[in-house]
């Protein structure tokens, strides 16, 4: 009987350890790079997509970059929507990409296949107003991090312990 109780306790401890410490859930993790602070975790929707919206600092028009989670938890840029082909914005598509003008007169580059392990963003101090868009809901990055700071956006699996140790979890599905 004692042997069973001891083995049962060991098994229980192992199960709890696995549940708490093995990374099982995938999140879009945004963490500060140039300042101290805790990361913010965003739950991704079922289609594993999100976008980043901001106001271009030179021509002061909206830009939206569309991304998708790859099977290897990298970030693939799929589209770019913008209003001006001025400084800092492409005037045409490259390779297999397609370039079109939308009904609203905006420029859309689609069929993009640029893959990144992470994306670093400097949160605008004055004009940019960087916003993360998930499921149509906007999350201003300046609500979570200092304006002017650099944040790293990446897709990572997180354990329950990681989620409990001082991070903010937003939009969890």
Image (cartoon, grey):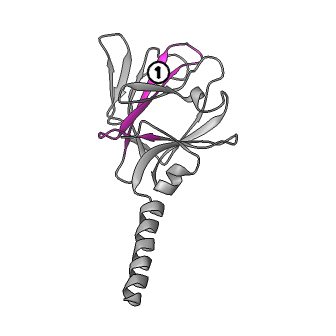
Instruction: Give residue 69's quadrant in the image.
Output: top left
Q: Give the range drawn in magenta.
A: 42-69
Q: Residue at x 50, y 50 (%)?
A: 163
Residue 24 placement (x, y as % from top left): 40, 57
Q: How many marks?
A: 1
Q: Is residue 163 visible?
A: yes
Q: Which residue lies furthest to the top in this view?
A: 104
Residue 61, magenta (yes or no): yes
Q: Residue at x 42, y 31 (%)?
A: 51
Instruction: Give residue 129's quadrant in the image.
Output: top right
Q: Which residue lies furthest to the front in this view?
A: 1
Residue on which disc 1 sits: 63
**Mark 1 residue crowding within 10 angstroms, few (<14) / some (14–19) / many (20+):** many
Q: State which quarter of the image contains the N terminus.
A: bottom left
- Above or below, 122 against 159 in this view is above
Q: Which of 45 and 51 is in front in this view?
A: 45
Residue 171 placement (x, y as % from top left): 42, 36
Q: Which of 142 and 72 is in front in this view?
A: 142
Q: Which residue is drawn at 44% across and 14% down?
A: 83
Q: State which quarter of the image contains the C terminus.
A: top left
- Above or below, 58 against 96 in this view is above
- Above or below, 161 against 167 in this view is below
Residue 67 placement (x, y as % from top left): 40, 36
Residue 150 as seen in the image, left or right of residue 62: right
Q: Residue at x 41, y 88 (%)?
A: 2
| Main secondary structure type of the part rendered in magenta | strand
């Amino acid at each position: 009987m004692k042997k069973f109780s001891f083995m049962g306790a060991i098994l229980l401890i192992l199960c709890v350890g696995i549940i708490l410490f093995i990374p099982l859930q995938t999140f879009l993790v945004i963490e500060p790079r140039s300042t101290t602070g805790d990361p913010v975790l965003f739950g991704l929707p079922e289609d594993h997509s999100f976008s980043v919206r901001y106001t271009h600092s030179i021509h002061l028009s909206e830009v939206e970059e569309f991304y998708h989670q790859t099977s290897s938890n990298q970030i693939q840029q799929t589209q770019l929507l913008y209003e001006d082909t001025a400084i800092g914005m492409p005037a045409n598509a490259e390779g297999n990409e397609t370039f079109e003008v939308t009904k609203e007169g905006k420029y859309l580059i689609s069929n993009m296949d640029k893959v990144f392990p992470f994306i670093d963003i400097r949160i605008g101090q004055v004009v940019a107003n960087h916003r993360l868009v998930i499921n149509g809901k906007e999350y201003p990055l300046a609500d979570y991090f200092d304006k002017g700071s650099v944040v790293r956006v990446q897709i990572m699996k997180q354990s329950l312990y990681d989620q409990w140790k001082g991070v903010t979890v937003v939009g969890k599905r």
